[in-house]
Amino acid sequence: MAKDLAMNVATGDLLIKDRDLLIVDNAERVAQQILITLRFWLSEWFLDTSRGVPYLEYILVKNPNVNHVKQVLTEAIMSVEGVERVVSMDVDFDVKGRRLAVEYTATTEYGLLTRKEVLGYGNG
């Protein structure tokens, strides 16, 4: 069973309680890993520039192809250990607010997982 260090999703900082790092597992770990994966830009990590979501190539372009954006994000979610299938996905581009909302439902080894992740600089 995979485990992960718990993080504050708003800040990206590790969660500490009573001077100990918190651990997440099961569906909570999968959801956290999906969020981390969606926030990880292609070529962001210098030791492996082949990993990450190609935001500059396909998503943050003028008139992005919504179906292709969904495909790219679905592939990113599918790369997370524990995800079996992406059942549905909706994307909402807010150009003025500089954010992308991704609402997805995925089947995992722990059951159905439905989340809405807001990526970018906007609030929501």
Image (cartoon, rainbow, N blue to C red):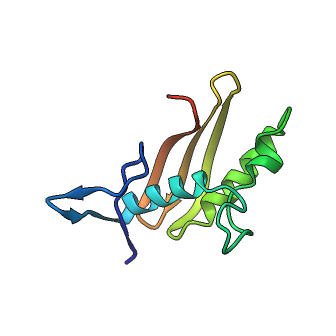
33 or 7: nearer the viewer = 7
Residue 122 position, x and y percent, is 56, 29
Question: In the picture provided, is 82 more to the left or to the right than 85?
Answer: left
Please determine whether, in this image, residue 97 is positioned above or below residue 66: above
**Residue at point 51% right, 28% down?**
123
Please determine whether, in this image, residue 8 is positioned above or below residue 100: below
Question: In the picture provided, is 116 more to the left or to the right than 75?
Answer: left
Total tally of numbered discs in the picture: 0
**Residue at point 74% right, 69% down?**
50
Please determine whether, in this image, residue 74 is positioned above or below residue 66: below
**Residue at point 38% right, 53% down?**
13
Question: In the picture provided, is 81 more to the left or to the right than 62?
Answer: left
Q: Residue furthest bottom?
A: 1
Q: Residue furthest top?
A: 96
The N terminus sits in image quarter: bottom left
Quarter of the view holding residue 46: bottom right
108 or 73: nearer the viewer = 73
Residue 33 position, x and y percent, is 49, 61
Residue 77 position, x and y percent, is 60, 58
Residue 36 position, x and y percent, is 52, 56
Question: In the picture provided, is 19 more to the left or to the right than 14?
Answer: left
